[in-house]
């Protein structure tokens, strides 16, 4: 089969011919129809200290068709169109993943390939309203957004919600989920075009964090926030603490802007704020997320699509930072 | 009646003769038997920008006997020995107090007086195993500790719990409550004597944060913490983030050590930590706390007692910072 293999010397992807994976017991073999790329892959490459002796096929997000079932697997999965849960071996504690936890794609072979063998518990039926491209845009970003908003953030109808860094995959799905949960959603970005597009997608307001006094202005127009979903951390984080209403939850899932500077503890305890770290989610959350997507016929925002042969260009596009929505990899039959 | 009145020029307390308060409808008149002092009073004095035209009688903590009931009050309260809930007008949102919220003692007349008239909903029957002195040591500290451990921290049997700044009233009651909730409790302090006393009271281990490498050593001996109750904030806070196990809760209710310096967001989201601000508690929590104290026959640690006439010395003692437990004010009959 064709697959994108990581060149461990140059940290680029190149297409090679690999053996189609064998189907282990309880596993299914999936013909991947589409994958999508994530910053997670860039970090994995960057943070990879020790080179692996094996060929590395990355890729956490994918959707496709089950074309084979292993010993003990449910035979009814054969032929099903599925979306893949990349959050593997979470463990029994809903608060946090255990020591066996890993994300599909590295070191376990991922979705940037024609075929993938995976335990049947990690496939969920693809909602009918989604194409394979759209389905492949959802797993990692949707799971992150769902746990952030629902499990951690305890979103309620009528909540005022701020989602930072709009344009990223998780932020855009968080916006869509929050709108369908009947919250009032505001967004922030350093890019006016992204803010304007978010308004056309249902955001009630937006703030450009590169303009002076943005937080004060946003506080005036919004009246403050009950729930903030932040992927940035960094120098703007104390502003989020100021924008939080009493009793608010600030859910943190990234650090694209770096370390969190000095915080005022009095604001945190007098406003009874909760600052909640989150990362990925468990199997129940993945299933609930896909169900929510199906129920509300939610479609992800797609920035662009590349064939597998051009995966290197897709990563270049992501590094540029100007995408709005997910970048898809189509895997030919 | 005799009362300690705040001298608004010198910010000291002086004993004066005031009129006994009238009993409003739904209120009860309490003969205060004992009160206790809190840092809250020092802050109220310090942060008081605008002088009040009235005589200010401070005091949040108190216990006594109901000697009068007002129109519409429950006549069965007459003669009851009670403990007073100082957390007034919390409002309907369990996450946070509303705009009418205030703490007994300022500006509303408090417990540093022979008599107090207060709405009957703020009196709870004193557990029988407590003297009036002991009962007066509990309200503010116990409410803070209870909400921090149970409502916010979701303490469970077997949890490893770290309580910082042992010696303070809330920290000591948090330790007692956590031990009775069958947690393994560790404590920290800058004072070896306080650490040793905490060990005799049931703490499993202690760390002196003034010694080099304390956090690393504590991590090794404890294996990390599921729940951390912190009153300090300040430069040691990032160490608490490092000491937290995956899925842990860090509950913050004070800032005796000042602002929180740079934090690593990756630790917060990869360990799925919750940093939870808390302050005081609502009526349900106060009742649950007093019930827990009665059920487990918990006694607060008392540092020293002063008669009302020597309240100024009691505050001097608190300012010295070397007390271990609560400082009591006895109110003569």
Image (cartoon, coloured by chain):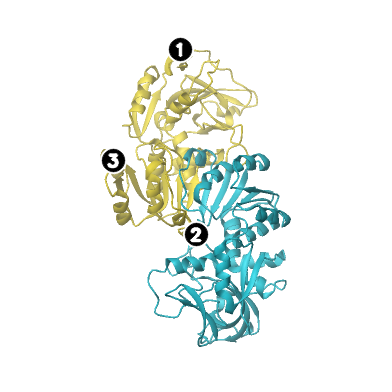
Chain colours: A cyan, B yellow
Residue drawn 39% across and 79% down? A53
* Of residues B170 and B328, the one drawn nearer to the viewer in this rendering: B170
Secondary structure at numbered mark 3: helix
Left or right, B129 with respect to B189, comes to right
Residue drawn 32% across and 47% down? B203
Of all chains, the one bearing label 1 is B
Left or right, B20 with respect to B259, comes to right
* Of residues A12 and A121, the one drawn nearer to the viewer in this rendering: A12
* Of residues B91 and A68, the one drawn nearer to the viewer in this rendering: A68
Left or right, A218 with respect to B108, comes to right
Secondary structure at numbered mark 1: strand
The Cα–Cα distance between marks 2 and 1, rounded to whole angstroms, is: 55 Å
Instruction: Identify the residue position indicated by label 1 in the image.
Output: B16
Instruction: Identify the residue position indicated by label 3 in the image.
Output: B197
Nearer the camera: disc 2 or disc 1: 2
Do labels 3 and 2 touch, CB within 8 Å? no
Residue B243 is situated, as x and y percent measured from the top left of the image, at 37, 53
Structural crowding at the residue carrying mark 1, measured as other residues with C-alpha within 10 Å and reported as few (<14), some (14–19) or many (≥20):
some
Q: Relative to B7, is A58 above or below?
A: below
Which numbered marker is on residue B157?
A: none
Nearer the camera: disc 3 or disc 2: 2
Instruction: Identify the residue position indicated by label 2 in the image.
Output: A95
Whether residue A171 is visible, yes or no, is yes
């Amino acid at each position: 089969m064709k697959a994108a293999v990581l060149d461990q010397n140059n940290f680029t992807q190149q297409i090679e011919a690999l053996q189609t994976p064998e189907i282990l017991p309880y596993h299914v073999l999936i013909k991947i129809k589409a994958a999508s790329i994530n910053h997670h892959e860039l970090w994995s490459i960057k943070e990879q200290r020790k080179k692996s002796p094996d060929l590395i096929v990355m890729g956490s997000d994918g959707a496709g068709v089950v074309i084979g079932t292993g010993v003990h697997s449910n035979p009814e999965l054969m032929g099903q169109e599925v979306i893949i849960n990349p959050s593997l071996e979470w463990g029994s504690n809903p608060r946090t993943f255990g020591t066996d936890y890993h994300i599909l794609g590295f070191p376990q072979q991922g979705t940037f390939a024609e075929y993938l063998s995976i335990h049947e518990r990690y496939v969920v039926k693809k909602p009918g309203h989604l194409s394979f491209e759209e389905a492949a845009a959802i797993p990692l970003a949707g799971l992150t957004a769902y746990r952030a908003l629902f499990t951690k953030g305890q979103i309620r109808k009528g909540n005022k919600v701020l989602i930072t860094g709009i344009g990223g995959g998780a932020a855009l799905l968080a916006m869509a989920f929050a709108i369908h949960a009947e919250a009032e959603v505001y967004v922030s970005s350093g890019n006016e075009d992204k803010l304007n597009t978010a308004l056309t997608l249902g955001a009630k307001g937006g703030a450009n964090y590169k303009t002076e006094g943005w937080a004060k202005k946003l506080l005036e127009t919004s009246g403050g926030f009950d729930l903030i979903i932040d992927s940035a951390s960094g120098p703007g984080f104390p502003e989020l603490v100021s924008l939080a209403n009493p009793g608010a939850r600030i859910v943190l899932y990234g650090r694209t802007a770096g370390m969190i500077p000095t915080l005022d503890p009095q604001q945190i305890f007098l406003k009874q704020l909760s600052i909640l770290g989150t990362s990925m989610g468990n199997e129940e959350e993945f299933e609930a997320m896909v169900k929510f997507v199906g129920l509300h016929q939610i479609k992800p925002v797609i920035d662009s699509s590349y064939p597998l042969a051009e995966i290197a260009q897709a990563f270049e596009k992501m590094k540029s930072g100007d995408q709005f929505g997910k970048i898809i990899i189509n895997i030919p039959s």
